[in-house]
Image (spheres, grey):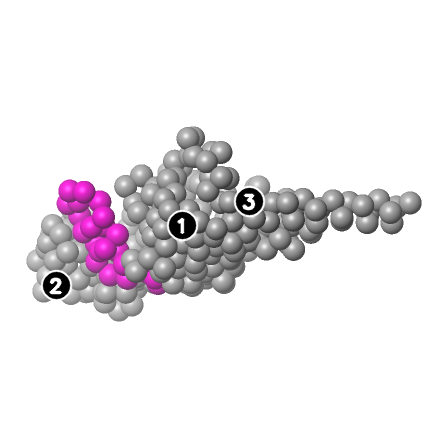
């Protein structure tokens, strides 16, 4: 009898998936669009495989997102989503695995052009420069904590274009997990600015950072002036900063 029930349940799942297979993604989005902070423009395809021409989140716009949702993973109580952005400013791809207990972000890699992103904001006074390169092997989290994290983020050709042109050099952030928190261990790439320290994130959006900054290149007056505004240097010429808060 148990085998019959299992076969019946499996058949029902297959039938439901078959009925939903060509359900338009635009139809699904319309059901929650009115209460969503995210605006999707130019949706095509189905819930299983589709394309979005543009995603608007407040004043930020990201274009050309493709996704593929595996129906077979749903048979095992999971949702496996492969996604890719073809926006020339935000070129990222990865995989998202959702189950009843764990969210997994895997195989995420690509780059973000900081200056091009900042220029999409109207009347922006601060214009950062450089490229953010992202390589996340895995980030696993449940309802309470981060279970695992492995990845690397680096900011190459880091600097500012406005209000003045300043070169920082380059910075790295290695992702690991510690005591249920996401840990970003910070370092520099021997450029104009030295950086060391870490940033900790909890599952609930709380963060704390403890960093130490210094200046190697004293030929940039704007860099030295900005550095002085951060606080009083220690005996080694570095400034220590600690703070915390909430991302959301």
**Alpha carbon distance from label 3 to label 1:** 16 Å
Q: Residues within 10 Å of mark 3 (few under 14, many from 20)?
A: some
Evaluate whether residue 184 shows in this view.
no
Q: Which residues are magenta?
A: 111-133
Please report the residue visible at 30 percent of the width from the left and 47 percent of the height from the top.
61
Which label is found at residue 5?
A: none
Q: Is residue 123 magenta?
A: yes
Q: Which residue is mark 2?
A: 218
Q: Is residue 178 magenta?
A: no
In this view, the mark in front (3 or 2): 3
In the image, residue 218 above or below residue 20: below
Please report the residue visible at 49 percent of the width from the left and 34 percent of the height from the top.
31
Q: Which residue is mark 1?
A: 52
**Alpha carbon distance from label 1 to label 2:** 47 Å
> Which sits earlier in the primary sequence, circle 1 or circle 2?
1
Relative to the observer, which residue lies in front, 8 or 101?
Answer: 8
Please report the residue visible at 42 percent of the width from the left and 47 percent of the height from the top.
43
In the rendered image, residue 91, in percent from the top left (x then y), is placed at: 35, 60
Left of 142 or right of it: where is 116?
A: left
Left of 98 or right of it: where is 118?
A: left
> Which sits earlier in the primary sequence, circle 3 or circle 1?
3
């Amino acid at each position: 009898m148990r085998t019959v029930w299992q076969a019946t349940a499996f058949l029902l799942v297959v039938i439901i998936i078959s009925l939903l297979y060509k359900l338009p993604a635009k139809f699904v989005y319309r059901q929650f669009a009115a209460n969503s902070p995210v605006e999707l423009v130019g949706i095509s395809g189905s819930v299983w495989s589709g394309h979005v021409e543009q995603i608007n989140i407040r004043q930020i716009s990201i274009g050309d997102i493709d996704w593929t949702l595996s129906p077979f993973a749903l048979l095992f109580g999971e949702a496996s989503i492969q996604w890719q952005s073809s926006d020339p400013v935000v070129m990222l791809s990865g995989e998202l695995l959702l189950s009843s207990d764990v969210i997994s972000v895997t195989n995420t890699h690509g780059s973000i052009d900081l200056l091009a992103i900042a220029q999409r904001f109207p009347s922006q006074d601060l214009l950062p420069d450089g490229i953010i390169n992202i390589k996340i092997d895995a980030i696993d989290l449940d309802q309470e904590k981060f279970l695992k994290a492995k990845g690397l983020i680096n900011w190459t050709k880091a600097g500012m274009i406005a209000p003045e042109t300043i070169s920082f050099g380059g910075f790295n952030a290695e992702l690991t997990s510690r005591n249920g928190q996401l840990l970003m261990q910070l370092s520099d790439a021997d450029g104009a600015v030295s950086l060391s320290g870490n940033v900790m994130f909890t599952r609930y959006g709380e963060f704390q950072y403890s960093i130490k900054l210094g200046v190697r290149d004293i030929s940039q007056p704007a860099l030295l002036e900005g550095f002085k505004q951060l606080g009083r240097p220690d005996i080694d010429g570095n400034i220590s900063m600690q703070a915390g808060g909430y991302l959301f």
